[in-house]
Image: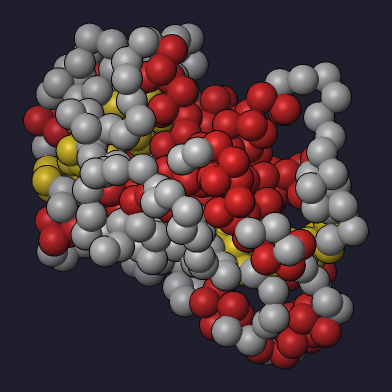
């Protein structure tokens, strides 16, 4: 059963292979216990990252290539920091300054990176499915750092880790998100973050509402196990978590909204609108934010409520966990060995 189909019914299997995937291409191929496993693995790195000396040697001698064909601040830097904190040699390839500009194809680029004997390749690409295509051509694990409108799996994992930490600080038992109502509002149609988060949050037991103008809502989105709204006030009513998304202008062909001002009026998270959510509701945004469009600063910067900078912190830990787990085969570290040690 995949994450898309399963509920948060249990922990990872004792004695089994806790993470049998060679690559991380999306949340959809993951089972719920595999999501929980990655979240649990990240906890050690949260702790390490809060120390003054943040160095581990798990990936010493390995080479990780970050190949980004689209712009990024958070994902690129956090994968780079993650690899370096684990002791790997990390190299960044930016499409804008690469031979892609001379006409080299994606496949030839993949063959080139593979020939350099990378031990892991992290890829962001503007086309849905491009990362899977590369994963098929190379010998090492490939991590999807966002492909078109398809998936952004490490974003969903870091969001789940952030939420779990925030809820635990409120003394709630939250191994999973059963009973939690999460409202995701924005450009659902073009958002790989929305897609991965819907898969991850529903797998972990949350009730997910999605809200967008009709032009920015995918057809048949309810088949993903969510409730769809066009009225933001209704979508916010009593929500425990409000996740705001940016308008993905770079993926839009033509006019999807009348104007940013009109969009803000109907779908912007203002202070007064946020009061419709549950009394102690939390706010998330994957970044980059368009302040004054989908979210106002009075909400984005609200201490104790906004998790936005915490999401960035958890991004490094999650990416360390993913790099560690996915390179264990190369390093001869069986994934299940640690579970057996812990008696899980
Ligand atoms: N959230 C996210 O993917 O941000 P970047 O585009 O800055 O990596």
Q: How many marks?
A: 0
In x, y percent, where is residue 259? 32, 45
Q: Is residue 205 visible?
A: yes
Res. 269 visible in picture: no
Please provide percent x and percent y for residue 127: 50, 74
Q: Going 41% across and 27% down the picture, which residue do you hit?
A: 164
Q: Residue at x 34, y 66 (%)?
A: 254
Camera-nearest residue between 13 and 246: 13
Task: Residue at 59%, 56% (x, y): give it.
Answer: 335
Q: Residue at x 63, y 59 (%)?
A: 334
Residue 71 percent coordinates (x, y): 64, 56
Q: Is residue 102 left or right of residue 110?
A: right
Q: Is residue 60 placed above or below 62 in the rendered structure?
A: above
Does residue 122 appear to the left or right of 340 in the view shown? right
* Colour mapping: secondary structure
Q: Is residue 217 above or below residue 276?
A: below
The quadrant in which residue 299 appears is: top left
- 16 and 99: which is toward the camera: 16
Give the quadrant of residue 273: top left
Q: Is residue 276 found left or right of 109 in the rendered image? A: left
Query: Measured from the top left, where is residue 247 in percent x and y?
Result: 39, 48
Give the quarter of the figure containing the N terminus: bottom left
């Amino acid at each position: 059963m995949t994450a898309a189909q399963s509920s948060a019914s249990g922990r990872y299997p004792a004695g089994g292979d806790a993470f049998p995937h060679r690559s991380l291409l999306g949340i959809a191929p993951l089972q719920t216990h595999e999501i929980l496993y990655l979240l649990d693995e990240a906890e050690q790195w949260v702790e390490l990252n809060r120390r003054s000396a943040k160095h581990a040697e798990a990936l010493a001698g390995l080479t990780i290539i970050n190949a980004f064909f689209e712009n990024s601040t958070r994902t690129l830097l956090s994968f780079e920091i993650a690899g370096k904190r684990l002791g790997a040699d990390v190299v960044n390839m930016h499409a804008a300054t690469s031979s892609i500009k001379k006409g080299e194809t994606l496949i030839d680029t993949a063959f080139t990176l593979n020939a350099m004997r990378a031990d892991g390749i992290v890829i962001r690409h503007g086309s849905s499915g491009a990362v899977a295509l590369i994963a098929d051509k190379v010998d090492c694990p490939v991590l999807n750092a966002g492909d078109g409108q398809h998936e952004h799996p490490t974003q969903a994992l870091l969001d789940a880790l952030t939420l779990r930490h925030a809820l635990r600080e409120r003394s709630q038992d939250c191994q999973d998100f059963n009973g939690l109502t999460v409202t995701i509002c924005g450009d659902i149609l073009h958002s790989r973050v929305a897609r991965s988060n819907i898969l991850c949050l529903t797998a972990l037991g949350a009730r997910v509402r999605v809200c967008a103008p009709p032009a920015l809502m995918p057809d048949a989105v309810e088949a993903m196990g969510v409730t769809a709204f066009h009225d933001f006030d209704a979508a916010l009513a009593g929500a425990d978590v409000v996740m705001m998304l940016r308008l993905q202008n770079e993926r839009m062909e033509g006019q999807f909204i009348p104007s940013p001002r009109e969009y803000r009026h109907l779908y912007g998270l203002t202070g007064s609108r946020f009061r419709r959510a549950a009394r102690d509701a939390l706010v998330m945004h994957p970044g980059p934010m368009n302040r004054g469009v989908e979210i106002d600063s009075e909400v984005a910067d609200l201490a104790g409520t906004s998790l936005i900078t915490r999401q960035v912190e958890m991004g490094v830990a999650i990416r360390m966990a993913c790099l560690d787990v996915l390179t264990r085969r190369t390093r001869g570290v069986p994934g299940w060995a640690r579970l057996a040690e812990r008696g899980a």
